[in-house]
Amino acid sequence: MLSLRLKSLKAYNTETSKAKIKLSSNELPYELPDYLKTRIAQEISKIPLNRYPDPLCAELKEVLADFFGIKESNILLGNGSDELIYYISTAVGELNEAVLIPVPTFPMYEIISRTLGRPRIEVLLKEDFDLDLEKILEVFKERKPILAYFSFPNNPTGNLFSKEKIERIRSEGLFAVLDEAYYHYSGNTFLKDALEREDTVVLRTLSKIGLAGLRIGILIGKEEIIKELDKIRLPFNITYPSQVAAVLILREGREFIEQSIKKVVSERQRVYFELQNIKGVEVFPSKANFILFRTPYPASFVHEELLKRGVLIRNMSYLPGLERCLRVSIGKEEENDAFLEALSEVIK
Ligand SMILES: *Cc1c(COP(=O)(O)O)cnc(C)c1O
């Protein structure tokens, strides 16, 4: 009785191997300081858990609006940006209209399109991992997509696509989603467009800046767009504890978040240079909190050997164009050192 579509799907498989050093999911490596944890415990203990949470997340939106420098009416919240990708994929265009996905990229765009039975147009990035504008425009002659996902910067390659190319593609008349999950590490944004245009939205998340466990994704767009998308949002999609904890951390823990981001950015620079110094390793520049690199050996071998040494990173070689590539998240200084040392040993 289940849909035939399900036959072609696989359950999302994230890395669950246990390792002493986990550099596989682009999380922030630092835990919240104790004073914040205590405050969260206090606030969470006050929640009437027999009650539904605020379906509008009014307080959280107020704090987020301040955090991002926008208005509450420009925000739609999701249980992680993954949920927002689901909403967008459901709501933009008709389900028989295609979705443009430059690949390799974040797998959820494809998975959700498949789930909904939407046709996909996947166009391989160029060798420098920028958008292949010629090929994309060529494809448009046969079939025009109505929706496009741009991971900005792109996960897992780490680069920012050319803004001009994105604008050119959008000018063909499609709805552009700028997934800025790594905005805090790149500083580049389409926020202005999202606030002014009906064909552009920006996705942000708290997951990559220390709060992955809360599952809070933020869609930013014009009020008219937000109002329409809000019609398909599940009523209580942000849990009560998540709302309370996020509000508190964004009010009392900004300093911690900002300092953490700075440390990661400076470690990114160091890890990049250290990787370049390992003979045989090809490193790709990154504007995010992870780095993609290629070695002369099969990625599964490198992955396993690192795991034996207690370091878990992500094998990316299954994605198109990423033969022998792996992605390492930027960790604490000592974690990065352990990774670099283990990798040097394995490459030798
Ligand atoms: C990690 C990631 C997300 C997922 O964010 P959540 O808010 O945790 O669901 C979305 N987009 C990209 C590109 C990511 O790398």
Image (cartoon, rainbow, N blue to C red):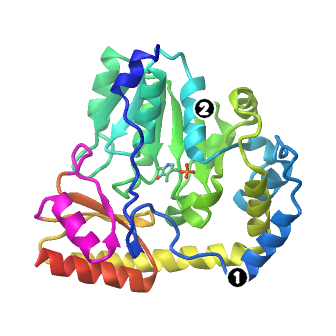
Residue 92, image quadrant = top right
**Residue 271 in picture, x, y percent from top left:** 34, 78
Which is more N-terminal, label 2 or label 1?
1
Q: Is mark 1 within 8 Å of ligand 1?
A: no
Q: Horizontal placement of 39 versus 305: left or right?
A: right
Q: Secondary structure at mark 2?
A: helix
Does the magenta-highlighted stretch encompass residue 1? Answer: no
Q: Secondary structure at mark 1?
A: helix
**Residue 100 in picture, x, y percent from top left:** 40, 30
Q: Horizontal placement of 274 versus 175: left or right?
A: left
Q: Of 231 and 238, which appears nearest the observer?
A: 238
Residue 47, image quadrant = bottom right
Q: Please determine whether, in this image, residue 173 is positioned above or below residue 107.
A: above
**Residue 298 in picture, x, y percent from top left:** 13, 59
Q: Which mark is residue 87?
A: 2
Observer able to see residue 171? no
Distance (Cα) linking label 1 and label 2: 36 Å
Q: Amino acid at mark 2?
A: Tyr
| Magenta highlight range | 296-322
Q: Of 190 and 15, which appears nearest the observer?
A: 15
The residue wearing badge 1 is: 34
**Residue 302 in picture, x, y percent from top left:** 19, 66
Q: Amino acid at mark 1?
A: Asp
